[in-house]
Amino acid sequence: QVQLVESGGGLVQAGGSLRLSCAASGLTFGSYAMAWFRQAPGTEREFVTAVMWSNGLTSYADSVKGRFTISRDKAQNTVYLRMTTLKPEDTAVYYCAVRMTPATGYDYWGQGTQVTVSS
């Protein structure tokens, strides 16, 4: 049973920083990639960033490039999201997800953690 548990969300002022964590358990054979998505009220869930588990290659949505950094700790099966220069439009529930193979989508999701950026 794969479980993803996010933490680190909270309330921050615009221009501030937060670091989210996502601890994965039950990944017996590792994973292909892990990612962060977010969903603001009244909007669809959107991709934020992803990291390939084997080689650390990353990708980012244009809206967060240069401000957010994804990283992984393979020994701890944990992925992090460092968010800097936060803007009110970054306010959303942030979800961690894992993709087991290149042929599948994101198979498992965490419960989400709220990030609120005040202006």
Image: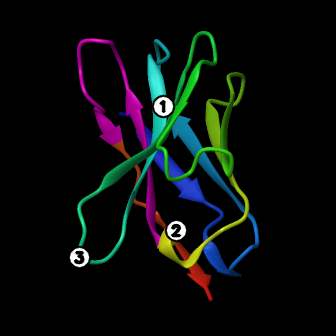
Was residue 80 drawn as part of the magenta stretch in this picture? no
Please identify the quadrant where the N terminus is shown.
top left
Q: Which residue is mark 2?
A: 90
Q: Taking the image as drawn, is residue 102 in sight?
A: yes
Identify the coloring. Answer: rainbow
Give coordinates of residue 65: x percent, y percent.
Answer: 60, 44
**Which label is found at residue 117?**
none
- Foreground pick, 17 / 14: 14
Q: In x, y percent, where is residue 76?
A: 70, 30
Q: Looking at the picture, does residue 9 appear above or below residue 38?
A: below
Magenta segment range? 92-108
Q: Is residue 10 above or below residue 19?
A: below
Q: Relative to 14, is 116 on the left or the right?
A: left
Q: Position of residue 31 (x, y in %)?
A: 46, 19
- The first of marks 3 and 1 along the sequence is 1
User: Amino acid type of disc 3?
Assistant: Gly
**Amino acid type at mark 2:** Asp
Please tell me whether mark 2 sits on a helix, a strand or a loop: helix
Q: Position of residue 30 (x, y in %)?
A: 50, 16
Determine the residue positioned at 33% across, 14% down.
101
Residue indicated by mark 1: 34
Crowd rating for badge 3 (residues with CA inside 10 Å; few <14, some 14–19, many 20+): few
User: What label sits on residue 42 in the rendered view?
Assistant: 3
Q: Residue at x 64, y 50 (%)?
A: 21
Mark 1 element type? strand
Asked whether 106 falls inside the magenta stretch, the response is: yes
Look at the image and tell me whether residue 26 can be seen.
Answer: no
